[in-house]
Image (tube, helix red, strand yellow):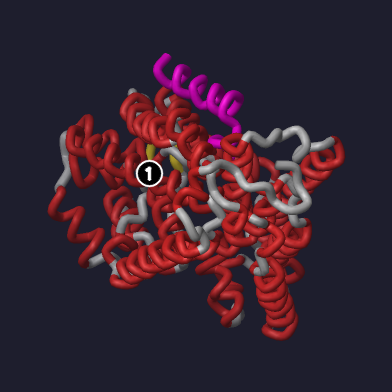
Amino acid sequence: MVSGAFLAAMAWIAITRSALAIIYFFIFFSFVWRLSSVLYIDLSGPVFSEQLERDIGPGVAAVPLVIAQGLVVAALMFSFRRGRLQELGIQMRSLPAALTSGGRFDFPDMAFWAVLLFTIGLWIELLVSGPIPLLAAMERFDYSRLYGGPLHQRLMEWGPMLAFQVGVFFAAPTLHDRPFDRRFGALFAVLLLYLFVVGHRFSSFYSYGSFFIIPMGASLLGREVKGLSTRRLFSGAALRNLWIAGGTLVLIIASALTYSYVFVRGFERTELLTKVSQRILVQQGEMWWMTYDRVFVQGNWNSGLAAYKLFVDPFDPNRNSTMQWLMELGLPLERAHFILGAGSAYAGGWPEVCFEMGGPIGGFALVALTAILLSEFMFLQTRCFVEERFATCFFLTPILFALLIDVVSGMVNSFVQVTFAVKVAIALVVFVTESRWRSSLVPDASIAASGPVPVPGREA
């Protein structure tokens, strides 16, 4: 019943606050999938987990998971409460035209050519560096390890952040009641096609697509607070194009999964059905069920050892240390290290990491802290986009990536790296500098408070 109420609340947000659902799609989709998987394990258990090589379930693991996910949703609704959005709308309507005129924004052309050159370089690198994974039935991990060039490696490291930036320029014109910039939509489509050709499957399309649409959700929210209608933005032709794009993406994902399971891995029909059912129904929830059984049922957790393995001595400090530690807890050590050494990892990580460190009580406090940090940062990122602080948006992107990845996969070791502190410091400097520059464009404070200033070529 608790899980059903939570899923109904998620559906209500998607219907009544669609802009927020788009902004948080990366997290919402993960929440629903993981909760559904845990419910399946709870209600159908014991079920066999191929990855863990043991039976798991039944139980009530969904209850603490729903509470943890509910704290994130509650923090989201508080940060994006309507009163706060109304205040943002008042501030936006009082900004002078010098700060909101889309006609004088020159970055899109520069960004388009930069991303276009990078994308062309990716394809050239693919054609000259070795076999094409799609034609050679090669796993994406093997291609990246053996043949991937420097541009390919940068895409693997920064891909979702690049998708977010492309989404920013795709959606930015809509803040001025103009259509989406189709050039960036085409660039994003070419990047997805590249991922398909080099052997990527659902997870990459999911993460890239989720980051790409965040600015679209922010744009819808910005239009709402500015008093602009969304109907003009989503005309019949625009909706038709979106449906075509969405259908094409679903077809690409289905084709990638089918090709990977049938041709790359060579699964027979019966084995294929088993693998798909494990992937959908079991693997998303199995690591949480293990943490639930270990922490809530057996009362077995070690905060000091967990912190040591997460922040001091992980198996591979350059990757998500949370999943490494969870796999070492749930598998024979040699097998866990073999899988991790091959470049793979299991699904999950959050909120497991909170309860492995804080136990059944302190874990919820860590969840609440994570939820507040994420929701307040997402509001800041959205506000910067709506106010067209594009330089700040750019330098906030790595922090956005780290926070979202943490809530989906529990990657906490990125927060203790020196590079993360440097990124935060740079973003703060840029935010202050851009704020002062924007203030310098207002010659008199009374101008900013006098009301909206007509933009040439538009109605006041």
Q: Is residue 452 left or right of residue 84?
A: right
Residue 3 colored in magenta in the image: yes
Of 328 and 442, which appears nearest the observer? 442
Residue position for label 1: 376
Residue 292, given in percent of the width and then of the height, sits at 29, 34
Q: Quadrant of residue 6?
A: top left
Task: Say if residue 355 shows up in the picture.
Answer: yes
Residue plotted at (16% across, 35% down): 299
Name the residue furthest bottom: 128
**Label 1: element kind:** helix
Which of the 4 image quadrants contains residue 365?
top left
Q: Residue furthest top?
A: 1
Looking at the image, can residue 56 be seen?
Answer: no
Q: Which residues are magenta?
A: 1-22
Residue drawn at point x = 61 percent, y = 25 percent: 15
Q: Look at the magenta stretch and give its main secondary structure.
A: helix
* Number of residues whose C-alpha sits closer than 10 Å to that of mark 1, classed few (under 14), some (14–19) or many (20 or more): some
User: How far across and down, in percent of the image, does residue 73 sit?
Assistant: 42, 32
Amino acid residing under circle 1: Glu
Give the residue at x 46% y 67%: 342
Query: Does 417 sit left or right of 283 as displayed?
Result: left
The answer to whether 45 appears left or right of 186 in the picture is left
Quarter the N terminus occupies: top left
Vertical relation: 377 (above or below) 296: below
Q: Nearer the viewer, residue 112 or 228?
A: 228
Most extreme residue toward the right, as rendered? 237
List x then y, in percent, for residue 433: 41, 67
Task: Name which residue lies at 33% across and 67% down.
Answer: 425
- Residue 130: x %, y % from top left: 69, 82
Residue 134 higher or lower than 122, as above or below: above
Is residue 143 magenta-colored?
no
